[in-house]
Image (tube, rainbow, N blue to C red):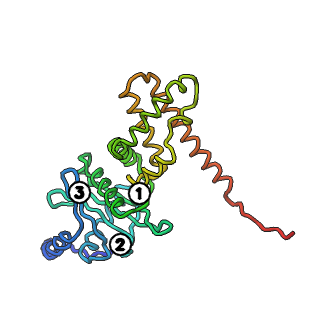
Amino acid sequence: ENLGLQYTCDPQEFAKRVKDTEQALRTALEGARTGPAADCEIVSFKPWENAALRELHDRLQAMPLLYVDGANYIDNTDPRWEIYLALRGGRVAGFATVYGFYAYPARKRLRLSQILVFPPHRRQGVASGILGRIYEDASARGALDLTVEDPSEEFQLLREGLDAKRLEEGGRGYYVGFVDEALRKGKAMLDNGMRAETLLLPSKEVYKRAETDLKIHRAQLRRVWEIVLLRRMRRSGGWENAEDVVRQLVWVRLSNVVGEKKLEERSRGKEVVELNK
């Protein structure tokens, strides 16, 4: 498959090409948007705007094919793509690709398409730093929210942990305050047999505020809410059945997902036909 790259088997020619392109890359990266995360620097750029950075991304494009199931190349000449690089000691530690979709009436919805941290830099906060920076940019640009395309289980766990932390620390205590109040009011009713999903789920206002302030998608908030609930129960004490209560919420959520999938399967192949009266 054509990678859009030139290659050589001559070591001297290879060293010369590296030297010739090094300064161009340094100059291009200096003009990109930067921000610190963990012990690395996060650089963001649009590859279609700069030939040197586009060539750098061309060289990175093959890496997801080696580490991520079902990975594909992206068209980095499309102006809606943005690349986030994590740099440690002048070396690329990882990268992510983000696509901007139109959202009615005049906004964008950002989708994280790919994220990859190279093996020597894993489990050192690089992926969390990249994701945190993307969230910051989504807020600064007034995006509707941030979604993730087919996340792996490992990345989903990382994302949920980061979003739970943002919920607990964000909104000047608004979200944890809502959880604590719901737990305080609902404990007696739960002990009397009322269902947890009628008492402890986020309100419409919470969903809207998390989407507006934290850029957390509604489906993601529903998952993260269970984590925050369990943490608050354990910290407050008096919730010997905390795991059972949260397990009930998880069961309801998964049942709804399964039900939606079954409905979608049943509707396949069906169409609406207008009959002449």
Q: Percent from the top left, x then y, of residue 181?
A: 44, 34
> Does residue 33 lie above or below 13 as drawn?
above
Viewed as shown, does residue 237 lie left or right of 103? left
| Mark pair 1, 2: CA separation | 20 Å
Q: Percent from the top left, x then y, of residue 253?
A: 54, 41
- What's the residue at 44%, 66% (across, down)? 107
| Mark pair 1, 3: CA separation | 23 Å
Asked if labels 2 and 1 touch by Cβ distance under 8 angstroms, the answer is no
Residue for badge 1:
146
Of the numbered discs in the image, which one, if any, rests on residue 76? 2
What amino acid is found at the position of numbered circle 2 in the picture?
Answer: Asn
Toward the viewer: 116 or 12? 116
Q: Earlier in the sequence, mark 1 or mark 2?
A: 2
- What's the residue at 44%, 41% (across, down)? 225
What amino acid is found at the position of numbered circle 1 in the picture?
Answer: Leu
- What's the residue at 42%, 43% (across, down)? 224
Residue for badge 3:
93
Q: Secondary structure at mark 1?
A: strand
What amino acid is found at the position of numbered circle 3 in the picture?
Answer: Ala
